[in-house]
Amino acid sequence: MKSYHAVLLTVALGAASAASADPRQDEAMIKLATQSGCTTCHGIDEAKPGPEGLKPIGPAWVDVAGQYAGKPGASEFLTRIVLEGSNPYSSHWKGQVSGLAMPPNAVAITEGDARMLVSWILALKK
């Protein structure tokens, strides 16, 4: 009976530490982002520097999380942006990044993976 309780305690502690773990350490999400090409333009805590001294190409994900924190429909909106790209004429990062628009990425990432990645990004905190 003791070993059963020890196993339950180990599982509970593991689940508790996973729930409080820093999302920045989620190797699966980092791997997905890298394989999908996201890290070419985006970083987690800092934006990737733009070419030849320009502003970053895309915003850092902690900045994205901060801008969309608590906004209804943020996850759906950002998933659509990941898959379909953004409009260069109504950029919500205008003046902050050198990239004019986010290109469509539906060929690089599935909708399900994009949803998981966006949820992970929105969980990041500065």
Image: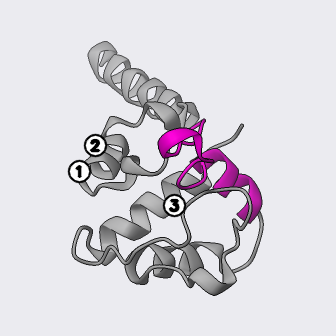
Disc 2 and disc 1: Cα gap in Å? 6 Å
Magenta region: 44-68
**x and y percentages locating residue 99 in the rendered image:** 54, 63
Residue 82 found in image quarter: bottom left
Going from N to C along the chain, the mark reached first, 1 or 3, is: 1
Q: Residues within 10 Å of mark 1 (few under 14, many from 20)?
A: few
- In the image, is residue 51 part of the stretch drawn in magenta? yes
Q: Which mark is residue 110?
A: none
- Which residue was labeled with disc 2? 31
Element type at mark 3? helix
- 22 in relation to 74, above or below: above
**x and y percentages locating residue 75 in the rendered image:** 57, 72
- 20 in relation to 39, above or below: above
Going from N to C along the chain, the mark reached first, 3 or 2, is: 2
Disc 3 and disc 2: Cα gap in Å? 15 Å
Element type at mark 2? helix
Task: Give the amino acid at mark 1.
Answer: Gln
Q: Which mark is residue 35?
A: 1
- Which residue was labeled with disc 3? 119
The answer to the question of whether label 2 and label 1 lie on touching residues, with beta carbons closer than 8 A, is: yes
Nearer the viewer's eye, disc 3 or disc 2? 2
